Image: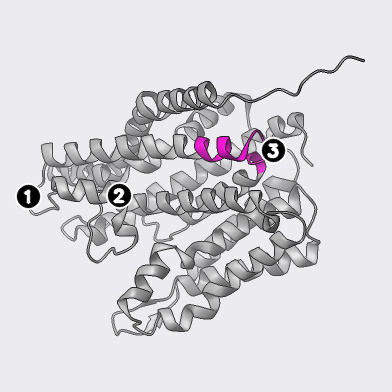
Amino acid sequence: MVTPSQGSRRKISWDLVRAGCVTLVMLYHSTTVSVEFHPEIEPRTFYFPYQVGASLLLAISAYFACVTIGRGTVFRYWWGRLARLLPAFVGGSVIIFLLTRAYYIEGWYWPTTRDLVEHLLMLWHWAPQRFEFIDVAHWTVPLQLMGFTAAALLYRSRWGHGNRIVWVLWLAVLLPILQWPIRVSDPEPLYRILVDGFGLHRWHMFVAGVAIWLWAIKRRLSDAHFAVLLATCMFAQWLHTFAPNAEGVLVPDVGSSVGVSLGLCVIAFVARGPDWDAVVPQALRRPIQWYAGISYGVYLMHQSLGHMVVRRLQDLGAPTTVQTLGMLVTGVLLGWMLTRMVEQPAYRYLMELHDRFLPVRKPAVTAA
């Protein structure tokens, strides 16, 4: 098991991975999604077409859920996850809503107050064809909330301990695979609502994160067992990427599948492998840690407003590389502001509120 000193030495490794994943998300949204969503935006000189970063962030969330869930009470763990995710999500959504309307681009999506309410209720997660996104990048938030809640419930039950958790992982990764033929056969709307609402097609990323923890930290999975389970998660990811092409034929996104698979191997290597501090220059450590520390805010803020920056820069005649760079810089600056002004203070306040009303009871000291 990793000791605190080992965990601190490896922190730069995790910061690198987290920062890298968020950067991949922004590159995909700035060079590919921007053009797909808004055809009048000219094709990028640099093109990154792989959906990799957001999926890997789900696996990282599952891994750290396992690492932290035993620290303190289960309710405090669950409350802390909500305190970290929800205030920033609400604050970021409201800011995006206001700025999208204030700097509206003719012909683009005009969000209404009803759209904002539906977005904050995450109704699009259950019926994306009916309810609008204020920002499509926010699709990971309800999945993380459900994942953290499931982790808390499992930890409190007998199924979250011993060998039973391994059976739960196999069920969670095999069930979506077995129902995949139904998913792609134009099923009934109620089926799609339940499957999409509970995120069955993404469960394998949470399974991968937990499996890495069991293998790398707890050493409760053999190398062979871990390899088979992780390979099954990679297969589930490959199935997930199937989508109709121009002729209506289902084809997989091989590049994204390979990228996610390689990313999972990197996460496993970081969790169990050697220290990376030796290869990271001292001068880069603080910037990397700072960037990783605001990564959730960057993730929430970069897409919709970043696309507006791309379009405005295009109208001014800026080269496509400058447009992409403008979106990246905008995401980082807005993410930093959201982290400092909303995420961090809200988290501190909510945790202090919890500890005030539900203080941790120290064990009684008995006389010798």
Picture coordinates of residue 251, whole percent (x, y) = 42, 79
Magenta stretch, residue numbers: 67-80
In terms of depth relative to the viewer, which is nearer, 157 or 13? 157
Viewer-proximal residue, 106 or 89? 89
Q: Is residue 77 on the magenta stretch? A: yes
Q: Which numbered disc covers residue 126?
A: none
Query: Is 51 displayed left or right of 316 in the figure?
Result: right
How far apart are labels 1 and 2 at the CA level? 27 Å
- Count the marks: how many? 3
Secondary structure at numbered mark 3: loop
In the displayed orientation, state which residue is furthest to the left.
Answer: 106
The residue tagged 3 is 276
Counting from the top left corner in percent of width and height, residue 155 is at 65, 49
Q: What's under tag 3, amino acid-wise?
A: Trp
Which residue type carries mark 2? Leu
Question: Circle 2: is it few (<14), some (14-19), or many (20+) Cα within 10 Å?
Answer: few
- SS for tag 1? loop
User: In which quadrant is the C terminus drawn?
Assistant: top right
Disc 2 marks which residue? 121
- In this rendering, position of residue 67 left or right of residue 62: right
Prevalent SS, magenta region: helix
Evaluate whether residue 103 shows in this view: no
| Structural distance between the alpha carbons of marks 3 and 2 | 41 Å
- Which one is in front, 110 or 260? 110
Tell me: residue 315, above or below residue 179: above
